Image (cartoon, rainbow, N blue to C red):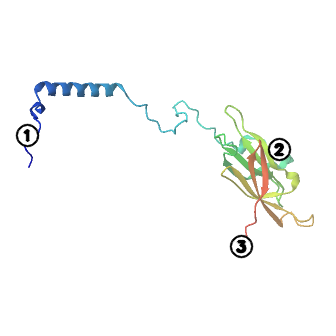
């Protein structure tokens, strides 16, 4: 037990009404000041990005091949789009359309052209790239756009003696937008088990 002589007199620690009034006034001042200092408005965008507004322009829809004259010479038979895929190929936020088209012949396997179609804000859709010319005598088997790349299976012929109904060669290729143009690369063949 401690000696009372060693304990200091704590009589001055009893709160008087003036102490309570001073504390309440200080707290009211802090609360009022907090009301004037507000954080920036919260947004759903990442730091450094421009906030989206209701007036922001909607993305341009993917071009419709029916609205574009394809560079095919088909005469009276006309042309037909056999494959179609869409996606953003150049990273501008607007999708492009990739089509495989050929003359609408009644038999055989006419060669295809593979074209990239784009439309800008206020501009009509147009062909912006030819990936495969019909003069190459290839047909498009499969066509896809994924992760900014165009992939296709191109069917061809090993010799002029192979009937046009039955392509006997297949090549899988990919195009990517690099340096302002589409760059073609061969893809590995898929092997069955």
Q: Gap in Å between the C-alphas at discs 2 and 3?
A: 37 Å
Tell me whether the residue at label 2 lies in contact with that at label 1, contact meaning CB atoms closer than 8 angstroms. Answer: no
Ranked by sequence position, the earlier of labels 2 and 3 is 2
Ranked by sequence position, the earlier of labels 1 and 3 is 1
In percent of width and height, residue 24 lies at 19, 27
Q: Secondary structure at mark 2?
A: loop
Would you say residue 166 is visible in this rendering?
no
10 Å crowding of disc 1: few (<14), some (14-19), many (20+): few
Q: Is residue 190 above or below residue 56?
A: below
| Closer to the eye: label 1 or 3 | 1
| Number of numbered markers | 3
Tell me whether the residue at label 2 lies in contact with that at label 3, contact meaning CB atoms closer than 8 angstroms. Answer: no
Q: Give the residue pinned by disc 2.
A: 71
Q: Secondary structure at mark 3?
A: loop
Q: Give the residue pinned by disc 3.
A: 192
Q: Nearer the viewer, residue 29 or 49?
A: 29
Q: Nearer the viewer, residue 68 or 144?
A: 144
- Residue 5's tag is 1
Image side of residue 95 versus residue 15, left or right: right
Q: Residue furthest left?
A: 4
| Closer to the eye: label 2 or 3 | 3
In percent of width and height, residue 123 lies at 71, 33
Which of the image's four quarters has the C terminus? bottom right
Q: Is residue 123 above or below residue 185?
A: above
In percent of width and height, residue 61 lies at 63, 40
């Amino acid at each position: 037990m401690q000696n009372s002589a060693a304990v200091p007199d704590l009589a001055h620690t009893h709160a008087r009404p003036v102490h309570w009034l001073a504390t309440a006034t200080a707290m009211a001042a802090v609360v009022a000041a907090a009301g004037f200092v507000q954080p920036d408005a919260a947004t759903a965008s990442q730091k450094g990005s421009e906030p989206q507004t209701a007036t922001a322009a909607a993305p341009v829809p993917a071009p419709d091949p029916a609205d574009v004259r394809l560079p095919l010479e088909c005469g009276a038979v006309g042309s037909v789009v056999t494959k179609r895929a869409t996606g953003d190929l150049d990273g501008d936020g607007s999708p492009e359309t990739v089509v495989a088209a050929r003359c609408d012949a009644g038999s055989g396997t006419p060669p295809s052209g593979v074209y990239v179609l784009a439309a800008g804000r206020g501009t009509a859709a147009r062909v912006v790239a030819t990936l495969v010319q019909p003069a190459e005598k290839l047909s498009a088997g499969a066509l896809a756009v994924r992760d900014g790349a165009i992939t296709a299976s191109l069917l061809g012929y090993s010799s002029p003696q192979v009937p046009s109904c039955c392509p006997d060669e297949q090549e899988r290729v990919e195009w990517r937008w690099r340096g302002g143009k589409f760059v073609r690369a061969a893809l590995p063949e898929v092997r069955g088990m």
